Amino acid sequence: MAQSAFDRRRINGPEESFPPLFDDDDEDIKLKTQRSRAPGDIRSIFLQPGLISQANGSAYIETEKTKIACAVYGPRQSKTTTYSEKGRLNVEVKFTPFSCTRRRAPIRDAEDRSLAVSIHQAIVSSIRLELFPKSTIDVFITIIENDGIEGCIASGSLAASTALADAGIEMLGLVASCSAAIIGDSIQLDPSEAEARVSSGTVILACMPALDTITSIWQSGQMTADMALKCMEQCHERCIDIHSIVAQSLLEHRKTN
């Protein structure tokens, strides 16, 4: 009996192989084991301004599995030829290839632009752009690790506002942001990616607590008007606590530099 020739040009695998097993049948049990905090609690925040020395201002934020770096350049002269009485804010968001469970291509896509628009809307009203005619302020956000789009928008807005303040750009106030998800009949603040996936709807609120002003509201999914208002109220309460964290981190950074 003739034997088949051994192909040395290929890496021969084992004679037998078995597909991986994924046990995602009971999402409720999985979420209970993952969430170790109360529904009204948010994840711990680590915020450090001024980590990128080449930028005019920068910030790094970490909330468990969400890790984001932000760099601000400007204000600098705009490249457009038309005169503008107000400055322009550009926000660019980029995922690292290893930031998600599935490896991402190193090119910008629709999700990057959607996050950039949401973060731009959250922070643009806090900047006094009328003081920078024919100027551009560039905000570059790099998502190192991603644990849900809601967390990326909220944490990205925090990092961007902190980096703008670190750059010395005049602002009306610091922007704080928080997200909420409707899971069953309860409201859970700062949901993870797994929690947001099984929720019926999510809300992201950005505001300037010092002025008691809301800068942006982003809502997706299905929820009643009463539930949406309750989500906004709880997010606003947490934004007051987050605002103190941002202010304290900037104050400590200025004392050490």
Image (tube, rainbow, N blue to C red):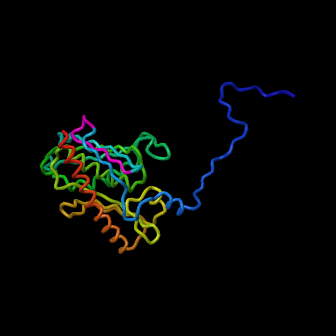
Res 54 quadrant in image: top left
Question: Residue 81 in the image: x percent, y percent?
Answer: 18, 41
Residue range of the region highlighted in magenta in the rendering: 52-63
- Residue closest to the eye, 197 or 36: 36
* Quadrant in which the N terminus appears: top right
* Residue drawn at point x = 13 percent, y = 51 percent: 130
- Residue closest to the eye, 191 or 86: 191
Q: Does residue 61 show up magenta in the picture? A: yes
- Residue closest to the eye, 106 or 68: 68
* Residue drawn at point x = 50 percent, y = 59 percent: 33
* Residue drawn at point x = 24 percent, y = 57 percent: 243
Q: Is residue 222 above or below residue 139?
A: below
Instruction: Report the side of 251 relative to 11 (left or right).
Output: left
Q: Is residue 185 above or below residue 108?
A: below
Question: Residue 198 in the image: x percent, y percent?
Answer: 49, 62
Instruction: Report the side of 5 relative to 249 (left or right).
Output: right
Q: Does residue 93 show up magenta in the picture? A: no
Q: Residue furthest right?
A: 1
Q: Is residue 178 above or below residue 79?
A: below
Question: Residue 169 in the image: x percent, y percent?
Answer: 17, 46
Res 83 quadrant in image: top left
* Quadrant in which the C terminus appears: top left
Q: Is residue 14 above or below residue 43?
A: above
Question: Residue 117 in the image: x percent, y percent?
Answer: 32, 53
* Residue drawn at point x = 66 percent, y = 28 percent: 10
